[in-house]
């Protein structure tokens, strides 16, 4: 009986802080525009309508908005992630048929905390577990491109409609690209040493976490993820703020806007040499759209930066032969181009 009472007390303490902080979060979030205007016009005393004023106003408003959204969503997803592990992911994917495996691989990529820098250890673990190469690629494409950071930033800057469009098209690209790679039977283009690697990892799969521990996992996720990406958010929003305030309205629109058939492939070519995550690139994409760049073109640029960045390709070269890398990049690029043109067409019907 005493043990149950102690357990309930511990549980109530674990839930108390989130329940207290959430109303404060709502009040602060709903008043960000007023706070931004007050700081810009009353404290800094800048004149409304000027380039510098709008640049600073954009920065002061967007940084706390994005941070608040990220804290909330990362905390929730951190709790969800406590129910998953790399080993569980492998077990779920290893026993599925090709297309079903591609779908599950892409969906699991959304809720697992992996980025392009994790590509090699993940690839090794999946191959060792016997997961088909096509399913592995569906996971590796989805994991960095579709996650709670991308969802929060897109929803906060563009609205939920565009966020859902991005998530849906990203899933489509991850599923279809992995399925095609699986059908082509390209295992011979994986570096020979990969198949000789033996895992020495020990995993405590039988450990059952209490709700308090899962809440702590949420706090840990916020600390670790924000600790890694906050600088990208600041830089991305700073670049976006500068473009918002100073780039002429029709410059980017004339280069990557609706009337240019080459806008989508040009955006992908511009995006591949860059290296960023969703936190760094989405604020810039927001400004591109404000300046007249077509929605499909902007999404294609973003997807190419996250899913086809040159640094990621260099990382993958350590485990893949050039033939498979070229096929991988080509398939994903064709998928991104298709999505870009489709959305440009439907938006401007």
Image (spheres, rainbow, N blue to C red):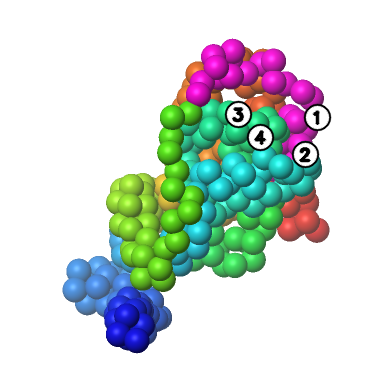
For label 3, the SS is: helix
Q: Is residue 199 visible?
A: yes
The residue lying toward the viewer, choosing from 84 and 44, is 84
> Which of disc 2 and disc 1 is earlier in sequence?
2
Across and down, in percent, residue 80 comes to 50, 62
Residues under labels 3 and 4: Cα distance?
6 Å
When asked about the image quadrant of residue 71, the answer is bottom left
When asked about the image quadrant of residue 24, the answer is bottom left
For label 4, the SS is: loop
Q: Residue at x 48, y 54 (%)?
A: 206
The residue lying toward the viewer, choosing from 53 and 264, is 264
How many residues crowd around disc 4 within 10 Å: few (fewer than 14), some, or many (20 or more)? many
Quarter of the C terminus within the rendering: bottom right
| Residue indicated by mark 2 | 98
* Range drawn in magenta: 171-198
> Which of disc 3 and disc 1 is earlier in sequence?
3
- Look at the numbered discs 4 and 1 and tell me whether their residues touch, using CB distance below 8 Å: no
When asked about the image quadrant of residue 200, the answer is top left
> Which is more foreground, mark 1 or mark 2?
2
| Residue indicated by mark 3 | 127
Q: Is residue 165 above or below residue 190?
A: below
Q: Is residue 250 visible?
A: no
For label 2, the SS is: helix
Q: Is residue 316 above or below residue 339?
A: above
Report whether 139 appears left or right of 35. Answer: right
- Look at the numbered discs 3 and 4 and tell me whether their residues touch, using CB distance below 8 Å: yes
> Which is more foreground, mark 1 or mark 3?
3
> Which of disc 4 and disc 2 is earlier in sequence?
2
| Residue indicated by mark 4 | 131
- Look at the numbered discs 1 and 2 and tell me whether their residues touch, using CB distance below 8 Å: yes
């Amino acid at each position: 009986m005493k043990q149950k009472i102690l357990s309930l007390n511990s549980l109530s303490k674990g839930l108390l802080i989130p329940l207290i902080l959430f109303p404060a979060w709502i009040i602060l979030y709903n008043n960000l525009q007023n706070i931004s205007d007050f700081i810009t016009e009353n404290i800094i005393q800048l004149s409304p309508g000027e380039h510098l004023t709008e640049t600073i106003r954009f920065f002061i408003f967007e940084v706390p908005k994005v941070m608040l959204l990220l804290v909330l969503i990362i905390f929730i997803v951190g709790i969800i992630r406590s129910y998953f592990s790399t080993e569980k992911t492998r077990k779920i994917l290893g026993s599925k048929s090709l297309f079903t495996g591609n779908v599950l691989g892409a969906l699991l990529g959304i809720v697992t905390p992996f980025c392009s820098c994790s590509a090699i250890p993940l690839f090794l673990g999946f191959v060792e577990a016997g997961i088909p190469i096509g399913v592995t690629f569906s996971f590796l494409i989805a994991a960095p491109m579709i996650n709670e950071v991308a969802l929060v930033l897109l929803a906060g800057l563009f609205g939920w409609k565009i966020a859902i469009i991005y998530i849906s098209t990203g899933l489509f690209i991850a599923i279809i690209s992995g399925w095609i790679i699986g059908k082509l039977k390209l295992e011979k283009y994986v570096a020979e040493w990969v198949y000789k690697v033996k895992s020495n990892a020990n995993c405590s799969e039988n450990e059952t976490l209490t709700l308090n521990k899962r809440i702590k996992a949420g706090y840990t996720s916020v600390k670790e993820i924000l600790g890694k990406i906050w600088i990208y958010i600041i830089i991305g929003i700073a670049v976006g703020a500068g473009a918002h305030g100073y780039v002429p309205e029709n410059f980017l629109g004339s280069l990557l806007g609706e009337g240019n058939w080459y806008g989508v492939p040009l955006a992908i070519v511009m995006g591949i040499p860059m290296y960023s995550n969703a936190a760094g690139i989405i604020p810039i994409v927001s400004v591109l759209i404000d300046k007249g760049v077509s929605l499909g073109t902007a999404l294609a640029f973003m997807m190419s930066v996250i899913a086809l960045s040159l640094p990621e390709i260099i990382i993958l070269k350590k485990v893949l032969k050039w033939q498979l890398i070229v096929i991988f990049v080509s398939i994903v690029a064709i998928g991104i181009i298709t999505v870009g043109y489709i959305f440009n067409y439907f938006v401007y019907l």
